[in-house]
Image: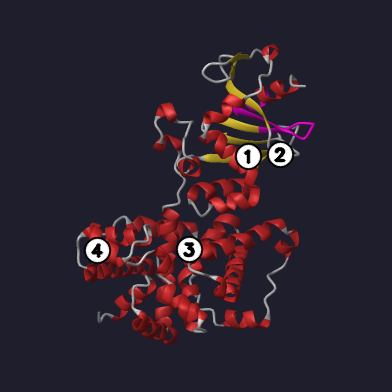
């Protein structure tokens, strides 16, 4: 291998033997052009990484019937486009975007390594949301809540889903503590996940095609 | 057979032995990836630069603790994200630059990371990606196997059923073609 630049490329890939590595590093230290080239190789690697970390809208990857219920945790979540919102309780109209959380979820679905970001920042919360959209087994643990006064009927088969014909959702009081002091919600396809802090410190999850007004009505009827 | 975890082992060994150029090489190689990962987290150019700098300083100080159980970038990434976490948790952190000691400034002054800022912007990275899709298939296949899959030249040679020298040459040619695009269309475009 005589090509000087090809040696640098191999050095970048760690594909030189010991002696050749030492010599190439020496060249690297003496020649600013080589240093610049290595930096640009690094840019290319970053670009490649970015490309393969793109978030893909759910409709591009998942069949229509399985558009919501994904199966494989964070790995499957790579196919999910999650948009995160932040809302100030109780005024839903003062909605703003929770950029940090959005970044975290985007990162979490971008690469296995980036799952660590979610673990570090809002570990329990983000994991809960992703589990919810990726694993419908949680639905079987629902606590039945009477909502007929707001025109929702509860079906038990196949899942405990509240429905008024237009809106369908599941609801559960979480055992985990999320330490929320305000309502937060995530958009997933045409559905939303709402996490509502209760007075006793627990958290209520609502998941379905619910708009904010409907959620407000439901919450008013939950003592 | 080489794997992803050992690709930098010689350089890391050299750096551990005090070879500063080996360390500089690793910094130069990984700065763009560390920076872009941090930018995805912070959405701030200044914070990403500071945190990337701090990441390498911390890596430099803790290099002895790197055992090679994971890829070097994964190790760097963990350091970077931990620093970014602190960044978010400390409001004071946001208001002041990282405190760099004298030794660390020495490292900074010898920083070879003279990459044009515009190259690390999202649009530029996307343009590079788009261009990579236009590479001849033989180059693109070897290059993607190397960069995305982390395959060794030996593995790529087996997969593509070509001599290892051809693999080496194709990856090099792919890089050169992309560099020509960067220099011609992005930096001078």
Q: Is residue B1 above or below residue A48?
A: below
Whole-number angstrom distance, CA of label 2 to CA of label 3: 33 Å
Tell me the subunit letter for badge 2.
A
> On what subunit does the disc labeled 1 rest?
A
Q: Circle 2 sits on which residue?
A: A177
> Tag on residue A85?
1
Q: Earlier in the sequence, mark 4 or mark 3?
A: 3
Nearer to us of marks 1 and 4 is 4
Residue B185 is left or right of residue B142, and the answer is right
Within-10-Å neighbours for mark 4: few <14, some 14–19, many 20+? some
Residue B128 in the image: state x and y as whole percent.
39, 60
Which residue, given by chain and number where applicable, does mark 4 sit on?
Answer: B157
Q: How far from the left and from the top, in percent, is residue A76? A: 46, 41
The reply to the same-chain question for discs 2 and 4 is no
Quarter of the image containing the N terminus of chain B?
A: bottom left
Q: Are marks 2 and 3 on the same chain?
A: no
Q: Which mark is residue B70?
A: 3
Chain of the residue on which disc 4 is drawn = B
């Amino acid at each position: 291998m005589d090509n000087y630049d090809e040696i640098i490329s191999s050095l970048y890939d760690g594909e030189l033997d010991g002696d050749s590595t030492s010599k190439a590093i020496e060249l690297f230290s003496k020649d600013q052009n080589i240093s610049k080239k290595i930096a640009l190789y690094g840019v290319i690697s970053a670009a490649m990484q970015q490309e393969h970390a793109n978030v893909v809208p759910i409709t591009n990857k998942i069949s229509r019937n399985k558009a919501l219920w994904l199966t494989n945790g964070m790995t499957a979540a790579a196919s999910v486009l999650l948009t995160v919102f932040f809302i100030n309780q109780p005024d839903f109209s003062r909605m703003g975007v929770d950029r940090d959380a959005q970044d975290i979820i985007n990162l979490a679905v971008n690469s296995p390594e980036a799952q660590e970001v979610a673990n570090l920042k809002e570990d329990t919360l983000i994991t809960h949301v992703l589990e919810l959209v990726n694993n419908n087994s949680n639905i079987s643990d629902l606590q039945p809540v009477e909502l007929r006064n707001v025109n929702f009927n509860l079906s038990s088969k196949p899942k405990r889903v509240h429905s008024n014909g237009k809106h369908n959702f599941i609801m559960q009081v979480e055992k985990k503590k999320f330490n929320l002091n305000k309502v937060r919600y995530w958009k997933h396809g045409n559905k939303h996940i709402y996490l509502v802090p209760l007075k006793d410190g627990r958290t209520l999850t609502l998941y379905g095609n619910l708009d904010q007004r409907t959620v407000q009505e439901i919450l008013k009827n939950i003592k | 057979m080489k794997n992803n975890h050992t690709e930098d082992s010689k350089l890391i060994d050299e750096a551990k032995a005090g070879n500063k150029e080996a360390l500089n090489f690793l910094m130069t190689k990984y700065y763009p990836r560390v920076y872009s990962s941090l930018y995805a987290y912070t959405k701030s150019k200044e914070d990403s630069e500071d945190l990337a700098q701090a990441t390498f300083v911390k890596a430099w100080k803790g290099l002895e603790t790197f055992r090679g159980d994971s890829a070097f970038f994964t190790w760097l990434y963990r350091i970077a994200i931990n620093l970014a976490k602190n960044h978010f948790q400390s409001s004071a952190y946001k208001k002041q630059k990282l405190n760099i000691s004298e030794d660390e400034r020495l490292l900074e002054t010898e920083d070879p990371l003279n990459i044009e800022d515009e190259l690390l912007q999202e649009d530029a990275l996307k343009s590079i990606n788009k261009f990579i899709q236009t590479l001849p298939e033989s180059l693109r296949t070897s290059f993607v196997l190397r960069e995305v899959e982390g395959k060794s030249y030996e593995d790529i040679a087996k997969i593509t059923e070509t001599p290892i020298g051809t693999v080496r040459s194709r990856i090099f040619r792919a890089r050169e073609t992309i560099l020509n695009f960067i220099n011609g269309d992005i930096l001078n475009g």
